[in-house]
Amino acid sequence: MDIILFGPPGAGKGTQAKRLVELLGIPQISTGDLMRAEAKSGSPLGEELQRYMSRGELAPDSLTIEVFKARLGQEDAKGGAIFDGFPRTTAQAEALEALLAELGRRVDKVVVIDVPDSEILGRITGRRSDPATGQVYHITYNPPPPGVEVVQRKDDTEEVVAHRLATYKAQTEPVLAYYDKKGVVVRVDGVGSLDEVTERIKAALGV
Ligand code: ADP
Ligand code: AMP
């Protein structure tokens, strides 16, 4: 099964993707995580990607598709994957379709996690993660257990969030029309407890 988790920054894509990994036994492919790992490595590609991420702008399609393709080709993604934060442009959606077609696969469902703008800022500025495990927390809604040292993403500031949200509306939301035509879009309400949202996604996927 190949599933896209779609929605604005802070919708809960990463959080829910990790839960679906357990449930469906297929990996999460997050282009944001892949780009942050590349940036951390200090490579020239990573330095370039970091410049886009710091500004809250999309990385160029060519670089993004290159990073994504390398991950999709790994052994654990042979039976399907959960795409988190990819595709974010129509060109990326077309590239995904071509890459999956080569493997005899296609996007089975696009799950849109709906969260109003008014919720986004608080979710993102309160986001923290454990660098050791990659687990994502929220200072209020999903606090880290005592003793776990968490960090904040550099692009999770109020200023950058506003730009990321504008970028989502201008460049990413229009990608939904591409999938609407294919009849694979399902929408779930992303407001509620983490468990409630997981249950809604499971129901939407029929799993
Ligand atoms: P995305 O991957 O879509 O950017 P995340 O999964 O990282 O979003 O979630 C953003 C923040 O919101 C995190 O701090 C996460 O703990 C928190 N969060 C996720 N789902 C919910 C929810 N249903 N209610 C409240 N906070 C949530
Ligand atoms: P995320 O972790 O999904 O919030 O993404 C963080 C940042 O990484 C984004 O603001 C972009 O700068 C970059 N990024 C992640 N995925 C993509 C993508 N599919 N296309 C372009 N840029 C991306």
Image (cartoon, rainbow, N blue to C red):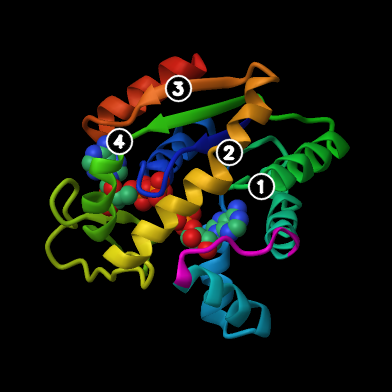
Residue at which label 2 appears: 26
Residue 187, numbered circle: 3
Please tell me whether residue 60 belongs to the stretch shown in magenta.
yes
Residue at which label 1 appears: 76
The residue sitting at 19% across, 48% down in the picture is 142
Of residues 82 and 155, the one nearer the viewer is 155
Q: Determine the CA span between mark 2 and mark 1.
A: 7 Å
Magenta stretch, main secondary structure, is: loop
Q: Determine the CA span between mark 2 and mark 4.
A: 29 Å
Q: Secondary structure at mark 3?
A: strand
The answer to whether mark 3 and mark 2 are in CB contact below 8 A is no
Q: Secondary structure at mark 2?
A: loop
Q: What crowding class fits label 3: few (fewer than 14 Cα within 10 Å), some (14-19), or many (20 or more)?
A: some
Q: Pick whichever of labels 3 and 1 is earlier in the sequence.
A: 1
- Disc 3 versus disc 2: nearer the observer: 3
The residue sitting at 26% across, 25% down in the picture is 196
Does 137 sit above or below residue 49?
A: above
The answer to whether mark 3 and mark 1 are in CB contact below 8 A is no
Left or right for 35, reference 45: left
Does 1 sit above or below residue 85?
A: above
Q: Secondary structure at mark 1?
A: helix
The answer to whether mark 4 and mark 1 are in CB contact below 8 A is no
Can see residue 117?
A: yes
